[in-house]
Amino acid sequence: MKDLKCAMKVCVYNKGYCCCADEIKVGTDSKCHTYTIDQSKKDDVMFEIGMDQTKPDYSVNTKVDCIAPCIFQKHDKCHAIGITVLAAEKDAECATFILK
Ligand code: SF4
């Protein structure tokens, strides 16, 4: 999946709101379990606002394994054209999730 936008900027796999992981795993809770906090980014997040205005696309073809009870999930894979992952308080949550 090329169109994987993610707001979890403190994740090691996040680059310019794109997910650069080769593969992510979304759990039954519709959360991204591949999310890994990058301590060095934690302090930088406030200073990236200017760069985001150019909106470059860093997307890679990320494989999305998913076991959430979602209408886009078939045989433990996500079949949506694209997904958006939002930054919740402590987790990264799939915002494209629609309960079956
Ligand atoms: S939280 Fe998940 S979807 Fe977002 S950049 Fe990290 S691995 Fe990718």
Image: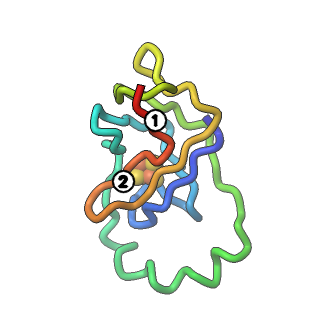
x and y percentages locating residue 35 in the rendered image: 34, 50
x and y percentages locating residue 8 in the rendered image: 43, 61
> In the picture shown, does residue 26 fall above or below 72?
below
Mark 2, ligand 1, within 8 Å: the answer is: yes
Q: Secondary structure at mark 2?
A: strand
Instruction: State left or right for residue 55 relative to residue 85.
Output: right
Q: Which residue, given by chain and number where applicable, does mark 2 sit on?
A: 92
Q: Which residue, given by chain and number where applicable, does mark 1 sit on?
A: 98
Quadrant of the drawing holding the C terminus:
top left
Q: Residues within 10 Å of mark 1 (few under 14, many from 20)?
A: few
> In the picture shown, does residue 19 fall above or below 49?
above
Q: Identify the residue at the far top of this view.
A: 75
Q: Residue at x 50, y 27 (%)?
A: 78
Quadrant of the drawing holding the N terminus:
top right
x and y percentages locating residue 16 in the rendered image: 59, 64
Q: Residue at x 42, y 28 (%)?
A: 70
